[in-house]
Image: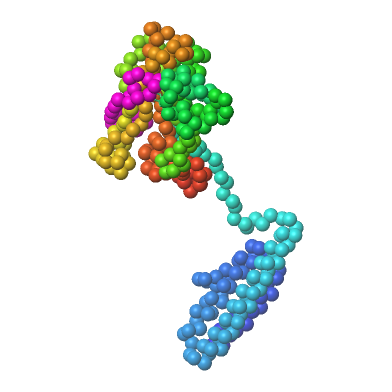
Amino acid sequence: MRDLLAALGALRERLTEIPQADQRRLQDLKTEILGRKAGALTKILAQVPKLDPEPRRAVGAAANELKREFEAALAARERALARTARASGAADLTMPGRAAWTGGLHLVTQVTGEICEIFHEMGFTRAVGPEVETERNNFTALNFPKDHPAIDAQDSFYLGGDLLLRTHTSPVQIRTMERYPPPIRVVIPGQCYRRDPFDASHSPIFEQVEGLVVDEGISFVDLKASLSAFARKFFGPTTRTRFSPSFFPFTEPSADMAASCSVCGGSGCQTCKQSGWIEILGSGMVHPAVFEACGVDPERYTGFAFGMGPQRIAMVRYGIPDIRLFFESDMRFLAQFSTP
Ligand code: PHE
């Protein structure tokens, strides 16, 4: 007991070192005296329970009192050091660093880029057009009959006159054919607008990737082969495709393409709603009336076109349940798809 009290007395002397200590010395002192394993005072405190009741009380009280004094002195010195550091404007080099944010591409941008890149490898170039379009480019030249429901202000955002926010990227087909003679092979990524509700599967603003091929001798075989090749590149080499009859005013015949579900391989799962197939895009052979509207000779040229929604495609590929996630800028969602 006497030894322990003497040791405490010696330790107490060291209190005087604290007011002179710099940041580093202060850390060392803290470890030397109060360190959880080898701290001098910690060691003494560890002895206390082994003593007889009488000395236990005396040494315990003295040791605990000294511990409080050290803690108070260390804290006071820490505050004083921080104060002088702030006053002198010096940087606190012990402060933890802030991790730098690196930017990344939005998932929809990534998927759109991937789609365009696959067609680029097949010889397509990229074309773009404005989001504000004329009724003529968006509907009339694409062979929509005058009473087609899509033309209605109920379904489209009109800006006054015959201008509207394009409801699809197909008007860029018109712009491309009026500007460039065949052969044409283009992909057209872009934003589109429809008067749709904003819910889990709809958004009034959404992306499309359009495609257009015009040349002599283009047939439905070219359409099927090109789009199936795309599906295999995008979803994997064992992907199968299925074409079913559809209708668009600007293509005849028209077909929707589905790909075998890349999640279950076609056996049926949640992603494909047990059908084994996922609808990917609309397509068809360019209608002769569209060629005529753009001054392309329908006797000489044929072509095919297609359109798909990269948001929908990203949703099935990554199992994203709600299209609104793409618009919310929530880093917890976006960072999962960040690219270095
Ligand atoms: N524009 C059509 C749509 O928005 C898609 C499509 C494009 C269909 C090209 C056929 C050919 O639904």
What's the residue at 49%, 31% (across, down)?
A: 153
Can see residue 277?
A: yes
Q: Is residue 168 left or right of residue 76?
A: left
Identify the image quadrant of the N terminus.
Answer: bottom right
Residue 279: quarter of image: top left
Quadrant location, ligand no. 1: top left
Tell which residue pokes out farthest to the bottom in this image. Answer: 54
**Furthest residue toward right:** 88
Does residue 186 show up?
A: no
Q: Residue drawn 66% across and 67% down?
A: 78
Asked if residue 159 lies left or right of residue 324, the reply is right
Residue positioned 66% across, 78% down in the render = 13
Vertical position of residue 1 compared to residue 167: above or below: below
Which residue: 53% across, 80% down? 45
- In the rendered image, which quarter is residue 201 located in? top left
Q: Residue 294: percent from the left, percent from the top? A: 47, 13
Q: Is residue 203 above or below residue 94?
A: above
Q: Nearer the viewer, residue 43 or 89?
A: 89
Task: Give the residues drawn in magenta, as a range.
Answer: 229-255
Q: How many numbered markers are drawn?
A: 0
Q: Nearer the viewer, residue 181 or 16?
A: 181
Q: Position of residue 339 (x, y in %)?
A: 48, 39
**Residue 261: x %, y % from top left:** 30, 36
Q: Position of residue 27 (x, y in %)?
A: 61, 65
Image vertical order of residue 276 relative to residue 95, above or below: above
Q: Is residue 251 magenta?
A: yes
In magenta stretch: residue 195: no
